[in-house]
Amino acid sequence: MERLLQYVFDGLSLGSIYALLALGLVVVFRGTGHLNFAQGEMAMICTFFTWQFHAWGLPLVVSVLLGMVAGFVLGAGVEVSLIRRVAKKSEAGVFVVSIAMFLGFNSLAGMIWGNLPPEEMPSLFPDEPDDFVRIFGAVWRYEYIGIMIVALLLMGLLFLLFAKTKFGLAMRAVASNPESARLVGIPTGVVLAASWGIAAAMGALSGAMVGGLAGELTSLLMFTPFIYASASATLGGFDSPGGAVIAGLLIGVGEQLAAGYAPGWIGQELRLGVALVTIFVVLLFKPSGLFGSTKVERV
Amino acid sequence: MMKINHGSPQHWALRTLGVALIALIIVWVPTQMSTSRIGQFSDAFVLIIAAMSLNLVLGFTGQISIGHSAFFGIGGYTAAILIKDHGWSPGYTFYAAAALAFVVGCLIALPALRIKGIYLALVTLAVAVLFPTLVKWKKLAWLTDGAKGIDSVRYDELPVWPILGELKGRDGRAVFAYWLAFVLLVVTYLVCRGLVKSRFGRSLVAIRDNETAAAVMGVNLTVTKVLVFGVSAALCALAGVLSTLRTGVITPEGQYVTLLGSIVFLLIMVVGGAGTLWGPIVGGLVYVWLDNTTRGFGSESDGVIGFLFGWSDQSPATLILGLALVIIMFVAPYGLVGLIKRLWVKVVVVVPKPAGTSLPTTGQ
C-alpha cells in the first residue's frame, strides 16, 4: 500500500511536468497544426537563460520568471521569423525547420555553456535529503509537492485564459477555423505568435523544474521529458488541452508503477519504453487519442 | 541558353561527358586519394544509401519517418551478431539484414495505414528512441552485449574481386570498403529508380500528392504503404551492415543508430532534394564535406570563421548544419538538385521528343 501510494505520488509529480510540456505541444498544434519538434530544446535553452540570470545574482524565482519571458520572446520570434514563412511554402517544411531548430539550439547551448562542467542547477523548492513529510507511510518530498502545485496552478491559469478571456476566445477561433477567424477581424498572426510564445514559456518553467530535480544542466536535459510529453499529447489527443494534462499524469503514474512493480523487466532503464509503447499503441488503435476529436476529410 | 533535342548527337555527347566525368571521379578517389579521404567517401556512400531509402518513404510517398536509424541499427546488429556469434561470412549478412529489416519495416508501417503527418512522425520517433533503449536492455544483453556494443566485426580475409585484385592491410581494407559501398550504392540507386519509374512508383507519388484521390484511382493504399516501408527499411539496413563492416564496431549510442542518425538522413535528403533520385547523392556528398570542414572550426580558426565561432571551445558543426537546413528550406525548397536544375536550364534546354514520333526532329 505504501509502495503503491509512493509510486502514484511520484508519478503524479513527474507527470505534472510532462503535462506542462505536453500542454505546450497542444497549444502549438491547435494554433498552427504543427508538431514543434524543438519544444524540448527551446525549453532547455530557456533553462540555461534561467541559470544564467541566477548566476548573475538574481533570486531564483525572478530568474525563472525572466527565463519564461525569454521563452515567450523566443517562441513568438521563431513563429514570426521562421515557421510562418515556411508554412506558406510547404507543410513538411515546418517539420524540417523544427528539426533544424532542434539541432541548432542543442548545438548553441553546448557552444555557449557546455564547455564548463555540468552547471549546478538550484531547485525552486527545498530539496535537502530530509525535506519531506510522511503521509500514510509514503515519502512526500517538498520538491515534488512544490512541482505539482506550481504545474497545476499554471495549468489552471491557462485554462482560465482559454475559457474566460477574449484572447482565449480568439485562440479557440483560430484553432477551429483560421480563415473565418481572420474574416471576423481576429489578428491571427498575433494569436499564433502568442501561442508559440506561451508554449515556450511553459517549456521554460518545466525546464527549470526538471533542471532543479536533476541538479545539473546539460544540453540533453529536456530530451527525455520531451518524449514523455509527446506521449502524453498523443494519448490525450493532440487538440485537447485537458486531455494532455490527464494523459501526462496518467503516463507519469504509469511509468512509475511499471518501473516499480517490474524492476527486473522494466526498471529504470526501460521506463522511457513505457511512454514509447504508449505512443505506438495509441496511434495504432485510436489515433485521435483519448480526448481528441477525429479529423474528417472531405474529398 | 542552348536548345538541344532529346536523343540528338549533342544530347548523347552531353550524357557521355557526364557519365565519363562521374566514372573518372569514382576511380580517382580510391586510387589517388589518402586512406582517410577514401574513408570519408565510403562514409558518404553509406549515408547516401540510407538517405535514398528514406527518400522512398518520405520524398516519394510523403510518409514522414524519423525512425530509419532503427533500421540502420537493425542492419548493423544483424551483421555483427551473425558474424561474431554464428561465424557467418560477412557477404551473406546483407541478405539476412535486409530480410529482417523488411519484416520490421512492414510491421512499423501498420500504424501508418491509419495516420499521417505528425502522428506518423511520432510513431517513428518512438521507434528511433526505443531501438537503442532495447539494445541496451539487460534482458537482451546476451544478444547485443548491452551498452558496450559489438566490436571487431570484419572480414577475416578480404574477398578477392576481379580487377581490384588482392587487397591487404589497413589501406586495402579502406579501398575494399569503398568499392563495396559503391556497389551497394549502385544497387540501391537502381532499386529506387526501378521502383520510382514503375507503376508502383506512380502510385507512391499519387499517395503523396493526395491519398484519398489515389485510393479512388485504384491504388491499394495498404499494400503500397506497407511494401514501400518494408523496402525502404531493407535498403537502410544495407547501409547499417555496410557501416558496421567498414568501421568494425556497432554500439547502441553509435553515430547513426540513435535518433541523430535519422535526423542526419533526413537532412541529407532535404538538402539534396526530396523526391528526386539524385537528391540523396548530392546531399550525402555535401553533408560529409560540410561536416568534415566545419568540425575543425573553433578557437584555433582565424579570419571570418575565427571571428564567428572562435568564442567557443565546441565545434559549431551541428549549428552550421541546422542553419544550412533552414537556409535550404527558404532558398531552395526542392533542395540542391532542384536549384541545379533551375540554373542548368539557363544554360542548356533539352527539348523532349514530340509525342508519337520515334525519330528525332530538328529545331522547333
Image: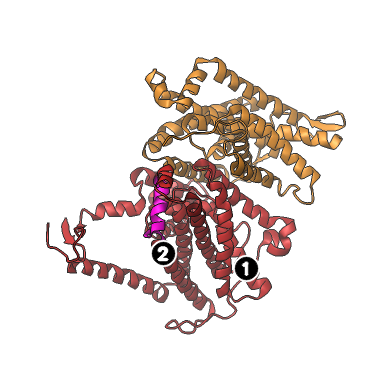
Chain colours: A orange, B red
Q: Main secondary structure of the magenta part?
A: helix
For the question of whether residue A193 can be seen, the reply is: yes
Density class for disc 1 (Cα within 10 Å; few <14, some 14-19, many ≥20) is: many
What residue does disc 2 label?
A: B189
Quarter of the image with the C terminus of chain B is bottom left
Disc 1 residue type (three-letter): Ala
Q: Position of residue A28 (x, y in %)?
A: 51, 31
Seen in the picture, residue B251 relative to A115 is either above or below; the reply is below
In the rendered image, which residue does mark 1 sit on? B80
Give the label, 1 or 2, closer to the camera: 2
Q: Residue at the location (51% across, 60% down)?
A: B236
Q: Inspect the image, locate mark 2, and give the three-letter code of the amino acid beneath it.
A: Tyr
Query: Quadrant of residue B201 in the image?
Result: bottom left
Which of A111 and A94 lies nearest the eye of the viewer? A94
Residue sitting nearer the eye, B306 or A40: A40
Q: In which quarter of the image is residue B136?
A: bottom right
